[in-house]
Image (spheres, grey):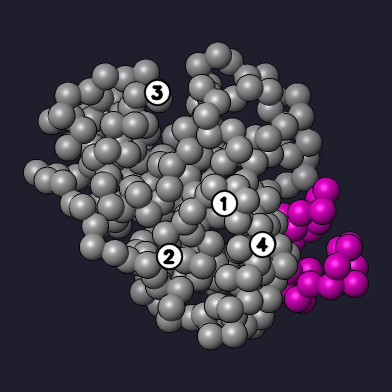
Amino acid sequence: MSAGFSVKVPACVVETCYEHEGVIVPNIMPLKALKRLRNFAVRPDDLFIVTYPKSGTTWAEQVMMLIRYNGNLNKLEGKHIMKLIPFLEHVKDIANPSVLYVARNPKDTAVSFYHFCHYVGPMPSYESWDVFFEEFITGRTPQGSWFENVLPWWRRRNHPNVLFLKYEDMIKDLPTAVRQIAHFMGKSLSDDVIKQISRASTFEAMKSNPSANPDSIISPTIHRENNQSFMRKGIIGDWKNYFTADQNRRFDELYQKKLSSTGLVMQFEAKAPFIPSLY
């Protein structure tokens, strides 16, 4: 075992993370902040975005802020969405929140998370994809198991305070997702406003928008020097460029074991999507 951890973890994790209630947490999320949330007072109109890392958090933030302002892009000009929406952890410990949960298929999530760890300085920089995969498949990466994060919210998907969306469905038909989120927020928006929000919330639009792309907030120096970006690809199926045949087999076995009786089905292939007009 590693010092301070209940299981053996790579040295990069020991240097940048700690363990809290069986979950590995990066040091940039201080323990005192997590403990304060135990007594967090929730208001009736509070709305939370909950995701596993690299599953569409920033995307959901962009859409929800634009819905809040009825599609008025000027309201976000000069204001970064990451500064407008604070990060709160352990939402599961807060009573009866109104939650938008976005789930992304775990294979693409793993690949994106691996690159994210190398992009953000305070995160553990794993020696290789193979090392990261072993940690991910056993739930030892920061924020813990993908399955343990997704399944509790999937089981609550029919609760009136929960809207459960899939990242892949948002890629296939963003206007429908925007309309669902608007309805969840109690907003009735015209088709033109829905299209305007959708246009401003595509991967390409957000990557080129300094108010939506976290590069300027997270690691501007790394981004400039190495041409890396927080918004790397945002596609379905990039996992095929990383998973070996054996890794894929092992993960499929775990996926079947964890999800076979839940009814939750994730999309791993980039099929021909329905793309409604955004213009």
Q: Amino acid at mark 1?
A: Tyr
Q: Amino acid at mark 4?
A: Lys
| Residue pointed to by mark 4 | 257
First in sequence: mark 4 or mark 3? 3
Instruction: Report x, y in % for residue 195.
Output: 17, 37
Q: Where does the magenta region start and end?
A: 1-26
First in sequence: mark 2 or mark 4? 4
First in sequence: mark 3 or mark 1? 1
Left/right of residue 223 with respect to residue 127 in the rendered view: left
What quarter of the picture does the N terminus occupy?
bottom right
Inspect the magenta stretch and tell me whether residue 78 lies in it.
Answer: no
Inspect the magenta stretch and tell me whether residue 17 lies in it.
Answer: yes
Q: Residue at x 82, y 53 (%)?
A: 22
First in sequence: mark 2 or mark 1? 1
Which circle marks residue 185 in the picture?
A: 3
**Mark 3 crowd level (few <14, some 14–19, many ≥20, 10 Å Cα):** some
Q: Please, is residue 241 above or below residue 21 in the view?
A: below
Kind of element beneath mark 1: loop
Which circle marks residue 268 in the picture?
A: 2
C-beta proximity under 8 Å, tags 1 and 4: no
